[in-house]
Image: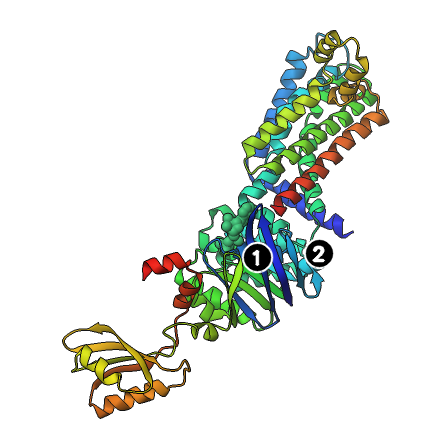
Amino acid sequence: MNSVSHIKTIAKRELSGYFASPVAYVFIVIFLLLTGFFTFMAGGFFERGEASLVSFFLWHPWLYLFLVPAVGMRLWSEERRLGTMELLLTMPIAAWEAIVGKFLASWLFLALALVLTFPILITVNYLGHPDNGVIFAGYIGSLLLAGSYLAISCMTSALTRNQVVSFILSVVTCLFLILAGWPPVTRLLDQFSDSFPRLIEAIAAFSVMTHFEGFQRGVIDSRDLVFFLAVIFFSLFTTSVIIRSHRAG
Amino acid sequence: MIRVDNLTKAFGEKLAVNAISFSVERGEVLGFLGPNGAGKSTSMRMITGFIPPTAGSITVGGFDMVQNPIPAKRLIGYLPENAPAYTDMTVSGFLGFSAELRGLAGDAKKRAVHRAIEMCFLEGVIHQSIDTLSKGFRHRTCFAQSIIHDPDVLILDEPTDGLDPNQKHEVRTLIKRMGEKKAIIFSTHILEEVEAACSRAIIIDRGQIVANGTPQQLKHRSDISGAVILRVGGISGADLKQKLSQLPTVRKTVVVDEDKFRVQARVFPQTSAVDGELARSVGELAIREKFQIEELHTEEGRLDEVFRSITLPETVKEATK
Ligand SMILES: Nc1ncnc2c1ncn2[C@@H]1O[C@H](COP(=O)(O)OP(=O)(O)O)[C@@H](O)[C@H]1O
Ligand SMILES: [Mg+2]
């Protein structure tokens, strides 16, 4: 019960920190503009001639690649830069409570941005009869995808007091998680290593693309759920290890 | 309340803190003195549980900081070096946040925030964002955070850094007053501060404790402690020296200042006791010889001199002689 209230206090502060500056609003506007652009222009929403949000979700792994690290880069690097980490970690709370609290606040912020894409949902329902179950699964997948990127950003932001470095490290890591299962890359790998189909499969199993794909089709597979939750758990756990080793000097 | 035993911290090869031991009881204010880089902040970071020690133990209120950090941390209020604070928050928001993490809620939280604001004279800036505060106010905001839960133990790393002389005085008075009921450790390199607020002081240099005692005791370690300052008119320095050398209580006399009207000398005693014996005999001599006395007093010793003589490396000491 105590942990819950600690996490809530930390998450509340973090979230109000986002809205204390115009950056949060700018971020949400950019997010909405980009999703709109990718869905309708690049994704060929109308050309598809079907009532679905395939063209909407298709771009999320790429869109999040830059937007999520932008949200997550300050999580711990800012604490280190300001020196407030010393305050936070000498409070009578456990370090993991602080890590989870800060992560949840940013995830909630991303969820809010995602919720604000609802006009697309209304549009597609107005224009036709989409399968809203599939769309719901897509949203769940998208949220998990964002959470995974965010946990990785959380981890890289604990490594440095410099937000730019934290951003770049996180983009690179997330890019790797995309490319490992991105069809053009897997096809390329296929050509080079006919003899190791297992290996390519194994590499692709680490990709967010492989696991996000099912959600886009409306399938919530427990293996995909486990994958995203495992990425989040592992990254947050690593964050705590980094913070502890940093303190130990 | 605070018990530190053989506390050691190594950063790679370098020993930042080397086997220090001391304890602080309720009602004591311990001054932590030392030149920059001596290891004061590192020690405080270990005592507050921010960094783990390489060796040694810390107990606060009976709780081991390494084994059982949460209850130990509950007892402590901490003002880190440079007074960090969330710059995007308002003063009251920041204090409310700290109170909540300390387990205060509702009315208790409101009262705690109000009390801290009053004690630290923050009434004028309650709703101001911390990044718009002057350094003094920001410092006091972080200080307010450290006393928000009325802790039994206070650890203050350079609490008067960046304050103007009036604010420094306020903070010292506050520390002294709170020290009656709490165990306080504060670090500083301002020596008057130690005399003004501490009941005991530790001088730490290159990670080790080199002196430990009340400010009085430390001052008596000074070379000039117990010497008598004598300023008289109508006599030359050489004559005065000659006359004083006849007294059995006098070891040597050093002329500090001399012009054609008066001479000022420092008279060192034969024994190290500070008991007024030397001053009496010098005074009697001065009356016998009809010196025109302008000043006569026994020196208590100066902390800054003790500090320098203890913490300066030998080579530098030679060079400054
Ligand atoms: N995180 C760290 N990594 C490496 N060395 C450190 C670290 N923190 C402090 N030191 C070193 O330890 C020594 C003591 O520093 P510190 O405790 O800050 O001194 P003080 O507070 O007395 O000025 C210094 O030489 C400093 O360079
Ligand atoms: Mg320091």
At 82% from the left and 18% from the top, the residue drawn is: A131
From the image, which quarter does the C terminus of chain B lie in? bottom left
User: Observer-nearest residue: B265 or B176?
Assistant: B265
Kindly tell me whether residue B93 is visible in this rendering.
no
At 65% from the left and 58% from the top, the residue drawn is: B56
Most extreme residue toward the left, as rendered?
A: B260
Q: Chain of mark 1?
A: B
At 76% from the left and 52% from the top, the residue drawn is: A2
Label 2 crowd bin: few (<14), some (14–19), many (20+), radius 10 Å? some
Give x and y (percent) for residue B113. Answer: 60, 59
Tell whether label 1 touches label 2 (CB within 8 Å): no
User: Observer-nearest residue: A93 or A17?
Assistant: A93
Label 1 beta carbon within 8 A of ligand 1: no
Q: CA distance from mark 2 to mark 1?
A: 26 Å
Please tell me whether mark 2 or mark 1 is closer to you in this view: 1
At 81% from the left and 28% from the top, the residue drawn is: A225
From the image, which quarter does the N terminus of chain B lie in? bottom right
Give x and y (percent) for residue B155. Answer: 57, 61
**Which of marks 1 and 2 precedes in the sequence?**
1
Circle 2 sits on which residue? B70
Could you confirm whether marks 2 and 1 are on the same chain? yes
Number of numbered discs: 2
**Label 2 sits on what residue type?**
Ile
Q: Which mark is drawn over residue A231?
A: none
